[in-house]
Amino acid sequence: MQITDIKVRKLFEEGPMKAVISVTFDGQLAVHDIKVISARDKFFIVMPSRKNPDETYRDIVHPINAQFRSVLENAVIAAYQEALAEAAAEVEAGDVAYAEIAE
């Protein structure tokens, strides 16, 4: 299975959640609402989940093995960092439209 597209849907400046991302696999399957989280100076991803009646959360979709989780996490975090750099450049260049979206 190949990652064929990664879209950074939203960036956040405040709090531990830094981005919401969608990933497409083999050009045929999209997974939305993957979150990039920053904690203890490290980034990791959280897969989409739903709340159970007992107030716990359960992943809707998730990698089956550590090797694929690592591949997915590295690709998503790289896409986040690239989008963050592009956004910073746009803000530095005075692109007010991005500054309003990022807030």
Image (cartoon, rainbow, N blue to C red):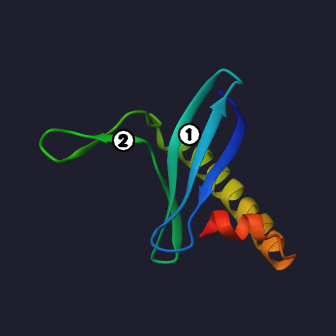
Position of residue 3 measured from the top left corner of the image (x, y, whole percent): 69, 35
Residue 78, above or below 12? above
- Do the CB atoms of the residues marked 1 and 2 lie less than 8 Å apart? no
Amino acid beneath label 1: Phe
Q: Which mark is residue 49?
A: 2
Q: Which residue lies furthest to the left in this view?
A: 54
Residue 78, above or below 43? above
Q: Residue furthest right?
A: 93
Q: Who's the residue at 43% across and 42% down the image?
A: 48
Q: Which residue lies furthest to the top in this view?
A: 28
| The C terminus: image quadrant | bottom right
| The N terminus: image quadrant | top right
- Left-right relation of 83 to 76: right
Position of residue 60 measured from the top left corner of the image (x, y, whole percent): 38, 33
Q: Who's the residue at 47% across and 37% down the image?
A: 63
Q: Residue 68 carries which label?
A: 1
